[in-house]
Amino acid sequence: MEQLKKYITYRDTEIDHQLFGSFDYHRDILIVVKIDDQVFSYDHSQITSNFRKIYEISLSSQLLVNSQEYLLFLESQKIPNAPIYIQKEVQFSLPSPVVITPSQIVSQFIQQQKEIVPDSSLANPPIYSGLQASTLLQNRQFLELFADWLMVRSPDIRKYRVPLRQVEDFLYRYRNLKDEEFQLQLFKFLHQRERPAPKQSDPPNSAKRQTQRVNELKEVVSGQQISNILDIGCSDGFIVEQCGQALNLSKENIYGMDIRPCISQNITFIESSGTEFNPDFEHKIDLITISMTLHHISQYKQVLKNAYRYLKPNQFLFIREHDACTNEIKLLLDLHDQSFNSSLWDFPESNHSEFVNNCKSWFIGKDELNQVLNQIGFIEKKMGNFRAEGWDAHGRVWWGLFQKKE
């Protein structure tokens, strides 16, 4: 078949988020119909009107034929194993009276993704269950840890000098609520007003956070020869920009990788989930950073294997992660994320039910992650914790510098 044009589309609120995490399996389906040997593609506005980005590329790869009527296009060379999920009952209209409902194709595709086994596990109960607060807060130790976290994280608690005992009493009183109602009551408690509609906020990487991360990284890699840097899961790109500039690197040698377009104009950006191997980087990178990203990727081991292949011999991987070695810690971290979205700030970032169905985290224990790194071929060079006081309450964040063995 001659080259056809294909749309690569990005997920949004109207796409089924149930089966993937924040950084996984986010794109790459196009359904077309073949009628009388003529192939029609579709106006994507009929699927959803708010795609993050739509663009065309040439496609000459093989077609996956589902029936004589339906063709499912996958671009395996460019974006392997990275489908987009479309709502099951959406209708696609041709430039003729024909109307199809490709729910069978999409359902089969979703079933294939259900069979993918994550490298780590979600918290039990998972974030979309609605039962995390009522499960965790029965445990007095973790109720107190969550209260300690709120005391530091909530601007309103600090502003109004709310005593710790009052925060603990609130959590105890509402500990049996389902998560959505719990977060609603928590917002009212923190802000002393009704919760408004969601509002998009500025990028989360504040100047203070950028400075902190830059200083951390400079200290860890002090004395090493670094000619380029790659940040996997770079978000808006500002942190890797600052880190690269602190290492006296030019834009051409500061790489950021993420599934969403970054904001920084001073890095070289690569659109990728991290699980997709990029041969352009093989054996070419001096320093790779993966900061608070691995737990968003269900198949995180593939990311680490790719990182190993990207590094030059004897060069370095820097990881910043949570040490989620028990289910209770995973629940606490999920409760942090719920609160960041739904109750902590002046405006919720998104609808609560949308958030918990979209944002899944496969948190990993430090010992488990170290074992995986060793099996891949990394050796530990340095390791430490980011917070001495309140480490358990504030996410058990640790860092490690690992060297590629040759």
Image (cartoon, rainbow, N blue to C red):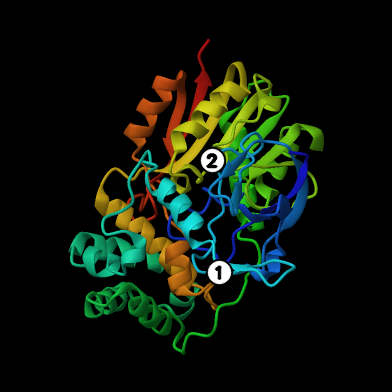
Q: Is residue 40 left or right of residue 258?
A: right
Tag 2 secondary structure: loop
Q: Position of residue 39 (x, y in %)?
A: 72, 52
Q: Position of residue 88 (x, y in %)?
A: 49, 65
Q: Is residue 241 left or right of residue 116?
A: right
Q: Residue at x 54, y 49 (%)?
A: 67
Q: Is residue 345 left or right of residue 201?
A: left
In the rendered view, tell whether residue 185 sits above or below residue 327: below
Pick whichever of labels 1 and 2 is earlier in the sequence. Answer: 2
Instruction: Name the amino acid, label 2.
Output: Asn
Tag 1 secondary structure: loop
How packed is label 1: few (under 14 Cα within 10 Å), some, or many (20 or more)? some
Image disc number at residue 237: none
Q: Does the residue at mark 1 contact the one at mark 2 (Cβ under 8 Å)? A: no
Image disc number at residue 90: 1
Q: Position of residue 154 (x, y in %)?
A: 46, 70
In the depicted view, which residue is nearer to us: 102 or 354?
A: 102
Residue 156 at least partly seen? yes
Q: Residue at x 40, y 62 (%)?
A: 336
Residue 301 occupies which quadrant of the picture?
top left
In the rendered view, tell whether residue 14 sits above or below residue 213: below
Residue placed under numbered mark 2 in the picture = 81
Instruction: Name the amino acid, label 1.
Output: Val
Residue 250 at least partly seen? no
